[in-house]
Amino acid sequence: MIDTQRIQEIVMLEKKRTWAVEYAKTWIGTIYLWSGSDSFGMDCSGLIHEVLQSVGLEPHKFDSTANDLYIKYKPYKIDYLKEGCLVFWFKGNEAKHVEMAINPYQTIGASGGGSPSMSVDKLSKEHPILALLPSWILKWLIGVYDAMNRDAFVKIRPVDYRGPGYKIVDPFLNTDTPGDPS
């Protein structure tokens, strides 16, 4: 007998996969902002978490590092690149960067940044008038400055631009409903 409910679930997951990739593309050009997860700027895990939240695979009011995402989705490791899969790069045993596959050859991700090259304190000392601004504006200005100097934005790249040695997981194979950890 055909399990129509299971077929419907698979069709819905495939639609969510496509929706996730399309939503990720809407962030192209957003500046890289270390620890960012909104329209002011995104870091790699902030972008992926936002995209997975948009299709119900990650809980809201919660954020994850690249390594947190790898640990969660590691049971869904696969050997080929497919739309919607997550691609992780490592330093030692820890995932340090994550992007999403948009096809078998390319990924989308927030990259080129790293931790800020300037602090709020340093910026305020060098330009005392800026000390009058709220700290969130100063952090955003630092992010814009860094992004422009480092070509750090959400962008599409070939999957091997960081070299070989990446690992691929498919979060759409996880059919568990996320819980809100807060």
Image: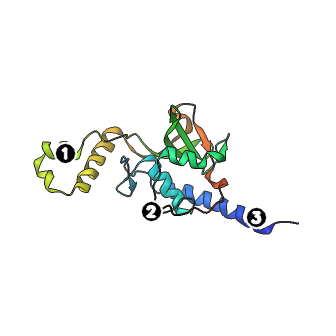
**In the picture, residue 2 is in which quadrant?**
bottom right
Which residue occupies 61% across, 45% down? 74
Front disc: 3 or 2 = 2
Q: Nearer the viewer, residue 48 or 82?
A: 48
Which residue occupies 61% across, 61% down? 16
Q: Residue furthest right?
A: 1
Q: Is residue 97 left or right of residue 165?
A: left
From this view, report whether residue 177 is shown above or below residue 130.
Answer: below
Quadrant location, the N terminus: bottom right
- SS of the residue under disc 2: loop
Marking on residue 159: none
Q: For the residues labelled 2 and 1, say whether their Cβ atoms are less than 8 Å apart.
A: no
Q: Residues within 10 Å of mark 2 (few under 14, many from 20)?
A: few
Which residue was labeled with disc 3?
6
Q: Is residue 145 left or right of residue 174?
A: left
Q: Residues within 10 Å of mark 1 (few under 14, many from 20)?
A: few
Which residue was labeled with disc 1?
121
- Residue type of the residue flagged with mark 2: Lys
- Residue type of the residue flagged with mark 3: Arg
Residue 77 position in % (x across, y down): 65, 44
- SS of the residue under disc 1: helix
The answer for how far apart the CA atoms under marks 2 and 1 are is: 29 Å
Residue 18 position in % (x across, y down): 61, 58
- Residue type of the residue flagged with mark 1: Asp
Which residue was labeled with disc 2?
61
Which residue occupies 11% across, 48% down? 128
Q: Residues within 10 Å of mark 3 (few under 14, many from 20)?
A: few
Colour basis: rainbow
Residue 98 position in % (x across, y down): 51, 44
Q: Nearer the viewer, residue 64 or 39?
A: 64
Mark closer to the chain start, 2 or 1: 2
From this view, report whether residue 13 is shown above or below residue 35.
Answer: below
